[in-house]
Amino acid sequence: MVDSPKSWAELAPHLIAVAAGRAAADLVIRDARWVNVHTREVLAGHDIATAAGRFAYCGPDAAHCIGEGTQVIDAGGAFAIPGLCDGHMHIESGMLTPAEFARAVIPHGTTTMFTDPHEIANVLGLRGVRLMHDEALLQPVNIFTQMPSCAPSAPGLETTGFEITPAEVSEAMTWPGIIGLGEMMNFPGVMAGDDKMLAEMAATAAAGKTIGGHYASPDLAGFHAYAAGGPADDHEGTCEADAIVRMRAGMRSMIRLGSAWYDVESQITAITEKGLDPRNMILCTDDCHSGTLVNDGHMNRVVRHAIECGCDPLVALQMATINTATHFGLERELGSIAPGRRADLILTSDLRSLPIERVFARGREVAAGGEILVECPHLDWPADTRSTVHLGKVLAATDFEVPAQGRNTVRAKVIGVVENQAPTKALTADLPVVDGVVQGAEGTCQIALVERHRATGAVTNGFVSGFGYTGEMAVASTVAHDSHHMIVVGTSRADMALAANRLGEVGGGVTVWRDGQELALVELPIAGLMSDAPAAQVAAKAQKMVEAMQACGCSLNNAYMQHSLLALVVIPELRISDLGLVDVTKFEITELFEAET
């Protein structure tokens, strides 16, 4: 088990003694180019001394800190940068438990994460949040937990496995690893003065903690009513104007590069071209699946991308370190290389390409050359957390039929997938009817939401376009943000039934079928969301899933992420839930067919 870091107050006498040369440091890194994110400077030929997991001395010569037992590392002129911070993310999106997620990202230089486990909250309620929180505290890096705010994300438009209450938010604010309130997705509720949403934010404010935001609407006039409610940040912007309006309202604009969300390039121009203060912008990932983590990186990938988009490397590093720490009230605790802070540090030979050569967390070397050097302890996840897929019956192809008796064609409302973005488009398509059942058409296939929390056997059917699927196929997933029922997309109702039943059999995950045969399966037994297998194993299965989706005709970048968000009823324009098709521009259930004229 990893010991929790001692406070600065507890260690101050020892840190002072080390910095003054009266006591020996645990570690001294010599001849580094110190990247100071407070002043945005690179200071060559500097030494860094750590003691008891914190920085004690950062200056031109730490010889006086070296004593018997001090480990001395010659940086050879390498850049010393702070460990990277992810300002907003969901561990569950990595398909991994907190321990395995930490194991995957530590070699990429991530030493601090601010996580919102609202995925598991929808399935297991407050107990699931506590399990995520407790495993997070065991890790050798800093994983802070935001108490989920919205389960369901939009009351009246979906049914979750559990609901989060203001009393539970108040309780969670007393837990040691809770840093604030997770993204307030019910922005219509905030704007309408909903008592429950306001009570959750009031409990967070009373605890002196940060309220996370989520305003997924192009209506910037309505945004001001939302901002007045208390959210301190927002990551749902997709264009420069979004970033600007958030920063002008006193929020931090969190701009994300996840596995499928490419929102940095379109917003960072507020800094690079408009010249706004970069200390009000934060880099984050939001959602990264295991394949991205293992093959491409984590926050190092985001920083590189920001630099490629024209951002000064030192500014980009601020956005992934000190800006994030300051936002959560932790500037004196982490996010920089400075006396007293947690000794989280990366050695890299280049600030633009950012190779992560050595990683230190709390003064201990935790990764080198892309390999992890420490253990990431696991919880013993209870048996009932591995039994959460309750279909209520064996599904048949007929469960996925869309009836339209007495009609030859229908004009159906269709969810339009947008590559590399979370929002969808509300489209329509004229679809044929054969023997009273609506058929798909070229470019348009079926989507179904299968209830999986209460074993009702209910299936909501609709249509989706943009994936490019061809032939007889289906993809099913129990990762279905945010209510996490089961989403099934396909061109064959028989394959849709096979895929859904398969996930019921294995306890959750993602499966791809074609012509009655399974092409790929990623088992996610914990809450139907995560695996506690090593990240490389999960990533290998996820890669086979991606390849199987491509074999079925899909060419979208990270289409699985698009698939998993088709039930997210707080992001426009059109979504599906267990209660029906949802028009997110109006926040109401809508009919599948347009009225006949």
Image: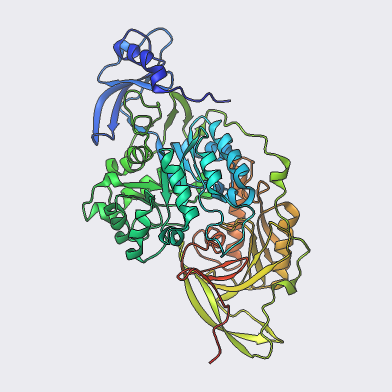
On the question of residue 298 being in view, the answer is no
For the image shown, how many numbered marks are present on the structure? 0
In this rendering, the answer to whether 484 lies above or below 588 is above
Which residue is rendered at x = 51% and y = 33% of the image? 371
Which of the image's four quarters has the N terminus? top right
| Residue that lies at the very extreme toward the front in this rendered image | 195
| Residue that lies at the very extreme toward the right in this rendered image | 394
Q: How is the image coloured?
A: rainbow
In this rendering, the answer to whether 447 lies above or below 294 is below
Residue 305 lies left or right of residue 502; in this view the side is left
- Closer to us: 493 or 77: 493
Which residue is rendered at x = 60% and y = 31% of the image? 377
Q: Position of residue 178 (x, y in %)?
A: 49, 37
Give residue 322's quadrant in the image.
Answer: top left
Residue 143 lies left or right of residue 242; in this view the side is right
Which residue is rendered at x = 55% and y = 86% of the image? 595
- Closer to us: 352 or 381: 381
- Closer to us: 356 or 145: 145
Q: Position of residue 139 (x, y in %)?
A: 54, 31
Q: Position of residue 591 (x, y in %)?
A: 57, 78
Q: Position of residue 290 (x, y in %)?
A: 55, 47
On the question of residue 76 being in view, the answer is yes
In this rendering, the answer to whether 20 lies above or below 191 is above
